Amino acid sequence: FVYDKIKTFNGTRNTDEYIFKKCRAETFNAANLTLGKKLKVSEKELAEQNITFYSGRHFWKTMMNSEGLGEDIEEVFMGHKVSGNVAKLYNHKDKQGEKRMIEKAKAVFDILDKCIFKTC
């Protein structure tokens, strides 16, 4: 179905054009600057501290992993569903039940309390 729709769509376009627009670094840079403004962090501070669009994801993954949350559940909470690893590809950890996810979400909050909010 999708392939047929893409063929139909592409038939109306210049064959030198991409079907999907490339996402360039400028898109992410603009989003990063916008986020910086909302957080009251200047463009200069962002550059000096090498804070990029993906810095938060890197920080999150490193913190959760260093506190032992578990690789599979870290990926689920980051929105990653498919891995190049065959075992992970066929084992849908994100579909193992609401109770398990709630327990892991509580673990996430415990890690945030310990590492960020220092309430533990």
Image (cartoon, rainbow, N blue to C red):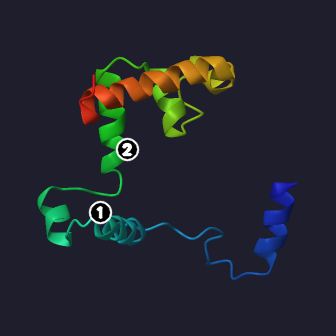
Q: Earlier in the sequence, mark 2 or mark 1?
A: 1
Q: Which residue is mark 1?
A: 39
Give the left or right position of residue 57, taking residue 18 as reference: left
Residue 3 in the image, given as x and y percentages of width and height: 81, 57
Q: Residue furthest front?
A: 119
Residue 86 visible in rendering:
no
Secondary structure of the residue carrying numbered label 2: helix
Tell me which amino acid carries mark 2.
Arg
Residue 42 in the image, given as x and y percentages of width and height: 19, 70
The C terminus lies in quadrant: top left
Tell me which amino acid carries mark 1.
Leu
Residue 21 in the image, given as x and y percentages of width and height: 57, 71
Quadrant in the picture for residue 58: top left
Residue occupying the point 22% across, 65% down: 41
Q: CB of mark 2 within 8 Å of CB of mark 1?
A: no
Residue 40 visible in rendering:
yes
The N terminus lies in quadrant: bottom right
In the foreground, 119 or 88? 119
Residue occupying the point 30% across, 49% down: 55
Residue 52 in the image, given as x and y percentages of width and height: 28, 57
Q: Residue furthest left?
A: 48
Residue occupying the point 29% across, 63% down: 39
- For the residues marked 2 and 1, what is the alpha-carbon distance in whole angstroms? 16 Å
Give the left or right position of residue 43, taking residue 30 as reference: left
Give the left or right position of residue 5, taking residue 81 as reference: right
Q: Which residue is mark 2?
A: 57
